[in-house]
Amino acid sequence: MSTHQVINPATEAVIATVPAASEQDTKDAIARSAEAFKTWRNVAPGERARLLRSFAQVVEANIPLLAKLEVENSGHTISNATWEAGNVRDVLNYYAGAPERNFGKQIPVANGVDITFREAIGVVGIIVPWNFPMPIAGWGFAPALAAGCTVVMKPAEVTPLTAMKLAELALVAGIPQDVFQVVTGSGRVVGETLVQDPRVAKIVFTGSTEVGTSIMAKCAPNVKRVTLELGGKSANVIFEDADLAKAAASAPYGVFDNAGQDCCARSRILVQESIYEKFMEQFEVAVKNVKVADPTLDSTEMGPLITAAHKKSVESYIDESLVAFRGTAPTGTGFWIPPTVLAITDRKHRALSEEIFGPVVAVTTFKDEADAIELANASEYGLSGSIWTNNSARAFRVARGIESGNLSVNSHSSVRYWTPFGGFKKSGLGRELGPDALHAFTEEKNVFFNTDI
Ligand code: NAD
């Protein structure tokens, strides 16, 4: 079997060698998954719930190990990685409450009884990107398993280690063999096979809009169900009536968390022109205070980028003539870029429209509320965003005006496992998390029982 080396992005050291599965390996995993589905779908709801809670407990016991693996493999800070492993536990616990509550409806009809059932959809292929390997995996596999589906999951080539560990932990927790499998390898081989194989009933894909649109097209011939979580270019909109000190102090953490490799990164800051100078003064202080350092340290706020190639792509956006100011970062080994702020006046500049996916933020100004909404919406994406204002009527108007799936007012929070998450426009299709995610893994069946016989 061919293999693939895994590299620590903070040190550039090779930390593991993992299998690069072939098309046949992937098809074999799909066949095992289809076989396992026949029994998993019929496990009593209470027992499926118990097994998911057991999985959550085993994840809980392994949080330090999972977090350490993620720091080494992805360069995430230890505090972020610990939160991420805890998020997998929380999402498992949340959907462990779902099997016994997978209700249908009884709909009034004449001469009989009409009932709807929510039936498990079948084998689900989950394709995960490298930027948040643990949470994104859990958002797919926890509700899928709860619904009675079986899962074949492909992590990103460069970040497979926590996914492989989670598959081991599932077995320790008592999840039956082949119900949750992880297959490591390339998108072109393993990912494509999951997308094309008719035995896979649904694809949950998180990644770039480019790959996501091609996957959607390839799912079409089989009318394969698909959930897509794609790119973003979210706006942090700051009005003159905002608490400027709080808006400026928090703005770096709205974009530079995970070194800006976050689909929800507020990578456009739109500031009302009347407060632009004051904002930039305070923002500069905050950016220079971001602690970019060894991700294993508790005090570190931002680590390295994922690969040398990605670092190069992010650097291509840093036009020195537009740099307003920068923070600091280690030099030497590792894929480091300091937090970088670009001041942009040309609204057509590519730094305002393209997803940079690194610690680079573009700041520009707007005139009034209507201009702010127009500028925020001048994007093919619509995933996230923030609105800073102390005028609550304005907060409501602007929140309703911005075309985006997840907005926060006077904060930068995007994701709570019990609220829905997903994108407008080219940021995606469907929603994950929240009370309705189970439905994404079921088909609704309607049955009429004739009593007039
Ligand atoms: P990517 O699209 O390159 O890869 C994502 C996954 O798809 C990887 O596992 C990859 O191996 C696989 N893949 C690649 N080509 C494939 C193919 N032809 N068929 C099937 N699978 C294939 O994305 P990435 O660089 O890993 O991740 C960064 C992107 O993910 C960014 O655009 C980011 O915004 C997006 N993202 C979105 C969300 C969200 O929830 N909306 C969350 C995180 C990341």
Image: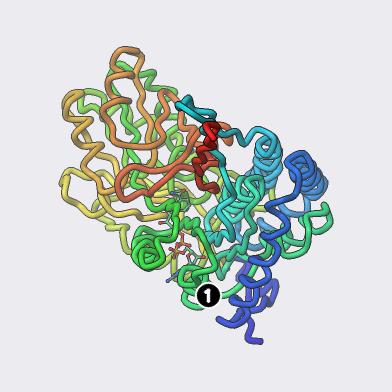
User: What residue do we see at 70% from left, 73% from top?
Assistant: 16
Q: Position of residue 322 (x, y in %)?
A: 25, 51
| Amino acid tagged 1 | Ser
User: What residue do we see at 18% from left, 24% from top?
Assistant: 368
Q: Residue furthest bottom?
A: 1
> Which quadrant is the C terminus positioned in?
top right
User: What residue do we see at 75% from left, 45% from top?
Assistant: 48
Q: How is the image coloured?
A: rainbow
Q: Residue furthest front?
A: 453
| Camera-side residue of 324 and 298 | 298
Local SS, label 1? loop
Compared to 204, does 241 lie above or below? above
- Identify residue for label 1: 186
**Does ligand 1 reach within 8 Å of label 1's beta carbon?**
yes
Can residue 148 be seen here? The reply is: yes
State left or right for residue 376 relative to residue 335: left
